[in-house]
Image (tube, grey):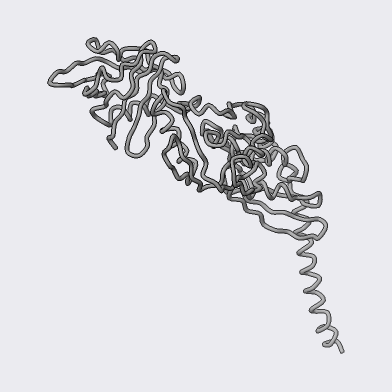
Amino acid sequence: MIQTLNRLWLPIFFITFLFTSCRKEDTEFIQAPDDQVLVANSILANLMQRTSMNDGSIDNIIDRANCFTIKFPFTVKANGFQIVINAVEDLSAVEYIFDTSDDDSDMVEIVFPVTIILNDFTEVAINSMDQLYTYSNDCNGENEDDLDIECLDFEYPITGSIFNSANELIDVIYFVNDYQLYEFLENIDQNDIINLDFPIKVKLLDNTEISLNNLDELKNTIEFYYDSCDEDDDYDYNDDDCDQCTKDELKSFLTSCNNWIVDKLERNDYDYDNVYEGYEFNFLEDGTILVYWSGYEANGTWTTSGSGNDLTVVIDIPNLPYCNNNWILHEIQSYSGETRVDFRVENVDRLRYVNTCN
């Protein structure tokens, strides 16, 4: 009889042990530190969702709309040239064509049908320009406040765990992009308690990385930086061309290739494109310039100062006066084997060098 009782108590003991162990795990989860628990409808959950929204301004050169993007791939005609846009980087090809001449009217035609992706990642099939206008007219205008936070981005993966107090289930969460994080935050409810694994990293618009150790730091960082930059919610594709330009980058481009030619030259709104036709310009690392043409040569100097959209390049070649100026670096472009370095002074002077060196 005693042996029979022992046999009955043994499975009961293990069942009790397993149940107690599971409840202990639940209790440990619920009792996680407050600075690591994310709940629905909190200020931080809202900030995180706004940060992970789809940024509709990245393709404004195509659709002139801040509240949606066109899903890749799609095809456009830019000033008559057909281009397949497979990624964000391909949008520079459209700008490259637009920048070829200042004397034409830039036109972009979208080849329909396309699919647009709204701020909340909803996808909508679009079959005509009129249908596209229906959605773009609902967007906020240029540089108007909108919900999406663009001045910082999450770095992935982000991991953690979730406990639902209604069904007492625990699950692992794992995000590798904005879409996954946004959808998760959109669907959590009051019964969900989320523990995030730290550190979590965010990247600012200037590529600065910040490592955060708890939810308070994450909340404070988003609140501090969310309105700290120009989100570029306008349709002027030329206004941010040199945000990240540096002296070292410019020096690398100019000195690594020989025989630059003048592709554009304007002084006081007059066109001098052909004045230096056949001239080859060579920029040396010691700050000198050597120019060759038809058996002749000239030399001068070049110096740089500043950074970004205020990077100044002083060119002084005594025998070639139209080149001489305190130029502002406007843009560096590389596309289809050609590189352009574009200098400007306000809207009256322009000097653009071109090279096919790789």
73 or 156, which is in the foreground? Answer: 73
Q: Where is residue 268 drawn, in percent x and y?
A: 38, 10
Residue displayed at 72% across by 47% down: 186
Q: Viewed as shown, does residue 240 lie left or right of 56? A: left
Q: Viewed as shown, does residue 101 lie left or right of 23? A: left
Rendered image quadrant of residue 129: top right
Q: Where is residue 100 drawn, in percent x and y?
A: 38, 29
Residue displayed at 37% across by 37% down: 335
Q: Is residue 90 above or below residue 107?
A: below
Q: Where is residue 211 drawn, in percent x and y?
A: 58, 38
Across the whole image, how many numbered discs are drawn on residues? 0
Q: Where is residue 172 drawn, in percent x and y?
A: 67, 57
170 or 133, which is in the foreground? Answer: 133
Residue displayed at 53% across by 36% down: 62
Spot the residue most to the left. Answer: 295
336 or 24, which is in the foreground? Answer: 336
Quadrant in which the C terminus is drawn? top left
Quadrant in which the N terminus is drawn? bottom right
Rendered image quadrant of residue 40: top right
Q: Is residue 207 above or below residue 120?
A: above
12 or 171, which is in the foreground? Answer: 171
Spot the residue most to the bottom. Answer: 1
